[in-house]
Amino acid sequence: MSLESDFSISPVRRPLPQDNPERAHVLYCLGSGVRLEMSESVLSSMRRQCSQNSMEETGGVLLGRHLETEHGYAVVVDDHLSVPSGDRSAIHFSFDEQSIQAIFARVSTSIDYVVGWYHSHVSGAPFMSKLDYRLHQEHFPLPWHVSCVVGAGEWGMPVGFWRLSDGELVSLEEYAVVVKPGAAPIVAHERYLRACLADDAHEPVSADFAAPLLADLGVDLEGPLGQAIQRAQLSTGTSATRLDELRLVIDLAVALAASAAAAHDLSGVRDKLARTIALEDMVSVVATSGEFRGDMSFCGTKGIFLTPGSPTISWFDAALNMIWPVNLPLPVFAACFSADGTAWLATDEAVIRLDPASGTSLLDGPQFEPRVLSVTGLAGEPRQVVVHGNDLWMATSERWCQIPLGGDEERIRLGAAWDLPAEDARVLVSGLRHGRGHDGYLITQSGDLLRRWHPDGTGVRKAAQQSLPSPWRDWRIDQACLGSNGVCLLFDSGRSSHIGMFDPESLELKRHYVRDGERGASQFSLGMCADPLGRLYLLEASTLYRFRP
């Protein structure tokens, strides 16, 4: 077969929907510039994503289509795509190579296309910074490209929209939020509240709502105060009116006036409430995943979840909001981080070192070369490990050990080891105080006595002792973390978890953090840890929180 000399094949550009917009319906032709229409479910989903990443800015692209009008454009947002990015912080978000790959993978199989972008601010009202303006100019230069910023206001999560007009960034003061047919306004409102992690304020107020808190504060529900409150019960079958609530207050006041013992109990509860804080007010959501389980350890945005005795851990990256399994050569019983981000994992006879990953693949996750360091002289199963300075402190089932870190040896020796005090419960304290390290720090509980221990040249020295008030004396200490305001101790009451902040020197109780949410929510179990800088994290079910006591 022969071809003519001037034969050639020229590429033909595929027509793209964004290059051939449809004409808008007459209703869209009112006004000039850009008319923006966004689905309510998309807006709620964006708020939810941003609320779950409260430590760093997050973002993605807006998907939909644009239409031509006689005076400008109409932009319809039907969906959004959250994208991973390694180029973000508490004050910055940008698109990197992983983001671009995620965007192309999505739009290549969708009839919608990118009509703009969005990102969050971790504090304050929505606005476009100079960096945001530059990103918009470089990547979203068309007049119908829209930028959305999700703020972090006190009342919900406000949003703002911007576009380019004659090279200048202008705000879209008006936009339409579309609720799908069949969805009542109250449903849309409840979805918005859930997206903002807010509870509807129209729950009926009644004595049986508050009564379970009495047990958390050490009040006997069968005692005079508990009986007085039960006599003043208000049915929660329907929402309480103001008259119902006033009747409840009057009935309770009459019941208390008739019992001197109940009035005495009430005075004690008032004093305890002076140092009681709702846990919900002190936490912010980091992420939610069914892989969040077992023991955990953190350093900044990197975390480890493990089940003691398993050779596999889960490595979590909060910046990417992704978690990957990591297989190890030995079963692991405890984990911690040093300040440089190095992970230390305790096994029966060795310590495994995991250095920070140099790069992360979204498919394969971070790549590690675990380094096994044999430790001579270990006895008992490791229970807890904590790094302070150049030392790894380990509590086993039998002893309390100090292990010097450093050097390139494959075998390390114990620096020192002490027999653990014969107490009912013993926990190591993790974290730093006011940015400074500390030597080994052990908290124990025996009956109603809380004790703090430090090592010395010959053994373990008791440094402080404090009698626990009721109801703390009836609960068992589970974990301990040292933050900037005090040492936080996690107790198990048998029904739920409680956190108390104690003075790090005297061990006097300073704050009591209780769950103050929906009815029946007192039955909850928490996990707690502190990173090397003293930042605290809580785990409840499958949700990870930052805790700022």
Image (tube, helix red, strand yellow):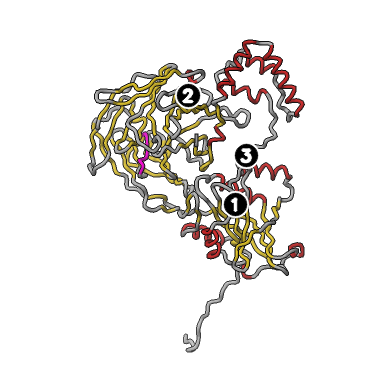
Q: Quadrant of residue 416?
A: top left
Mark number displayed over residue 198 = 3
Amino acid type, label 3: Ala
Residue 338 lies in the magenta-colored region:
yes
- Count of number-bearing discs: 3
Q: Give the range drawn in magenta.
A: 333-339
Distance from disc 1 to disc 2, alpha carbons, whole Å, reads 40 Å
Circle 2 sits on which residue?
509
First of labels 3, 2 by sequence position = 3
Residue at the image position 23 percent from the left and 34 percent from the top: 413
Gap in angstroms between the C-alphas marked 3 and 2: 30 Å
> In this rendering, is residue 200 above or below 491?
below
Query: Of marks 1 and 2, which one's residue comes earlier in the chain?
Result: 1
Query: Left or right: where does residue 211 sit relative to residue 241?
Result: left
Secondary structure of the residue carrying tag 2 is strand
Give the label on residue 126, or none: 1
Q: Residue 503 carries which label?
A: none
Pinpoint residue 120: horizontal percent, then vertical percent.
56, 51
Mark 2 surroundings: few (<14), some (14-19) or many (≥20) residues within 10 A: many
Residue at figure coordinates x 51%, y 18% from the top left: 470
Residue 453 pos. (x, y %)? 34, 24
The amino acid sitting under disc 2 is Leu
Q: Nearer the viewer, residue 390 or 524?
A: 390
Of the image marks 1 and 3, the number of the one nearer the N terminus: 1
